[in-house]
């Protein structure tokens, strides 16, 4: 009988990693991976696959690990996902594939994420590439944004033989993978750049410093540059704030700005001349993955860090692993607390006044609504506040594209599960449609859109043949 307890994964000690930006989790070696793969029951009806937004053949790649055929395991993985080394690190497996694992009923679920990471890292280390398309079909598709949605859509289309070009507004490719997720969770040169290199090997072209809506419009891509369909995977980079007093003071950051300076512009690296007011006592407002990333980054930049979240620990939306790591590293949590105002002295933050909350009736999300406890406010002494309250899509693309419908939150409206918008040859997915969500959900949307684009262009080709 297979072991009911999963093979533990090696990590940096909390006291050591809290002072560096090296990857926290060290992953499995070959022997550990084979042993953990041996715990898989190879179910006839694998519920784990139904829990995966990109429908990876999970038992299939795990069975190849058991046989020590790591290259075959990678080919199984790469036929479903363009970013396995990324997914193995940042996906919330505990609520998705691992959450449905049958082995987890009477023991620990199989460590699917850690096994995916092992296989993907093995492929990167040994120069193993995904299988290329048999032929090019001559159809051109433009993809806006090189984040997880765009890369996934482009990779799937390339495997089907399409000529795909990704347009990225920034000077580096990867979207949220490079500007949002810290180095200690997702190494950029070691993982992200190499994963993007695999997509380039499929024939996908990448163009950076192209701002759609300024450099060129979607209509120009279609009418002047000959793209037959467009996928918008531009993410959601417009930060939300609370509107409380003191929010405009020096020392108040959106999490996007704080993380972008550290991650994309490498402010954490002393060899880079990137300014960042890191802060000595930092309050991070929010309880999602972005809040954990900002808090753990501030800690590594030398601050004492407080996380302020208006619900209880059970309602924290961040991954359990990230919350656990943050606590191990010494970050302090002020739960059932909500900011009331940011205190300012000489134009700079000098504290944050918070008020106690208690949980009342459930709201539309199904979680119990936080209710203010009267006369319970107190001040936390801080010099920096980071707002990690979610983001909305930048309105630039929608405002410069004729006939593209958006909702009241500025998100592009997708009419079906494949990302079809109000423009028949324009598709959209990921955070640009849903607002801020997870990497894997964006990938799922990119995968669905690739199918939608393929179906659309196939029908157009059939119409042309019939008309001819």
Image: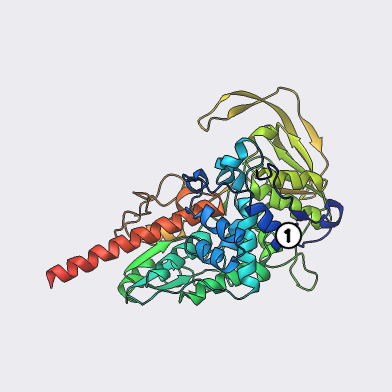
Instruction: Please say whether residue 213 is visible from this viewpoint.
Output: no
Q: Nearer the viewer, residue 438 or 227?
A: 438
Residue at (75% x, 55% y) in the render:
297
Q: Nearer the viewer, residue 446 or 342?
A: 446
Q: Position of residue 308 (x, y in %)?
A: 72, 39
Depicted 208 relative to depicted 46: above or below? below
Q: Which quadrant of the view contains residue 34?
A: bottom right
Quadrant of the frame with the C terminus: bottom left
Q: What number of labels is visible?
A: 1
Q: Position of residue 17 (x, y in %)?
A: 82, 57
Does 228 sit left or right of 276 as displayed? left
Instruction: Please say whether residue 335 is visible from this viewpoint.
Output: yes
Residue at (40% x, 62% y) in the render:
231
Give the secondary structure at mark 1. loop
Quadrant of the frame with the N terminus: top right
Please, which colouring scheme is shown?
Answer: rainbow
- Label 1: which residue? 184
Depicted 166 relative to depicted 110: above or below? below
Does 447 sit left or right of 96 as displayed? left
Depicted 190 relative to depicted 61: above or below? below
Outermost residue to the left:
467
Q: Nearer the viewer, residue 153 or 107?
A: 107
Q: Position of residue 72 (x, y in %)?
A: 54, 66
Does 347 sit left or right of 141 as displayed? right
Q: Which quadrant of the view contains residue 408?
A: top left
Q: Position of residue 396 (x, y in %)?
A: 46, 60
**Badge 1: few (under 14), some or many (20 or more) residues near its Cα, within 10 Å?**
many
């Amino acid at each position: 009988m297979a072991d009911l307890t999963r093979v533990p994964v090696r990590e940096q000690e909390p006291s050591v990693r809290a002072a560096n930006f090296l990857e926290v989790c060290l992953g499995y070696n070959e022997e550990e991976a084979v042993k953990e793969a041996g715990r898989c029951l190879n179910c006839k009806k694998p519920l784990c696959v139904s829990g995966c937004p990109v429908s990876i053949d999970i038992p299939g790649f795990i069975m190849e690990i058991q046989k020590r055929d790591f290259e075959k395991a990678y080919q199984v993985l790469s036929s479903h996902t363009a970013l396995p080394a990324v997914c193995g690190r940042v996906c919330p497996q505990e609520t998705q594939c691992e959450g449905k694992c049958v082995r987890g009923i009477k023991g620990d679920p199989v460590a699917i994420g850690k096994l995916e990471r092992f296989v993907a890292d093995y492929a990167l280390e040994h120069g193993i590439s995904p299988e290329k398309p048999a032929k090019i079909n001559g159809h051109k598709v433009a993809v806006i944004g090189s984040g997880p949605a765009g890369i996934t859509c482009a990779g799937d289309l390339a495997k089907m033989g399409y000529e795909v070009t990704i347009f990225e507004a920034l000077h580096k490719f990867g979207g949220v993978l490079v500007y949002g997720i810290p180095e200690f969770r997702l190494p950029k040169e070691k993982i992200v750049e190499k994963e993007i290199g695999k997509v380039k090997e499929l024939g996908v072209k990448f163009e950076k410093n192209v701002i759609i809506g300024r450099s060129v419009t979607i209509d120009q891509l279609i009418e002047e540059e000959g793209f037959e369909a467009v996928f918008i995977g531009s993410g959601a980079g417009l930060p939300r704030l609370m509107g409380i007093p003191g929010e405009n003071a020096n020392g108040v950051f959106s999490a996007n700005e704080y993380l972008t300076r550290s991650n994309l512009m490498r402010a954490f690296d002393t060899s880079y001349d990137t300014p960042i007011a890191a802060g000595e006592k930092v309050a991070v407002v929010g309880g999602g993955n972005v809040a954990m990333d900002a808090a753990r980054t501030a800690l590594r930049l030398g601050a004492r860090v407080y996380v302020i979240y208006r619900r209880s620990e059970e309602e924290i939306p961040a991954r359990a692993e990230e919350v656990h790591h943050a606590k191990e590293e010494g970050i302090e949590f002020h739960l059932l607390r909500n900011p009331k105002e940011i205190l300012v002295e000489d134009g700079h933050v000098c504290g944050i006044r918070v008020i106690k909350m208690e949980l009342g009736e459930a709201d539309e999300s199904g979680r119990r609504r936080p209710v203010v406890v009267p006369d319970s406010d107190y001040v936390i002494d801080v010099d920096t506040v980071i707002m990690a309250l979610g983001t909305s899509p930048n309105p630039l693309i929608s405002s410069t594209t004729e006939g593209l419908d958006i909702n009241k939150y500025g998100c592009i409206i997708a009419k079906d599960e494949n990302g079809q918008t109000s423009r028949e040859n324009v598709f959209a997915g990921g955070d640009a449609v849903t607002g801020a969500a997870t990497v894997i959900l964006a990938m799922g949307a990119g995968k669905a859109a690739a199918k939608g684009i393929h179906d659309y262009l196939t029908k157009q080709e059939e119409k042309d043949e019939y008309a001819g």
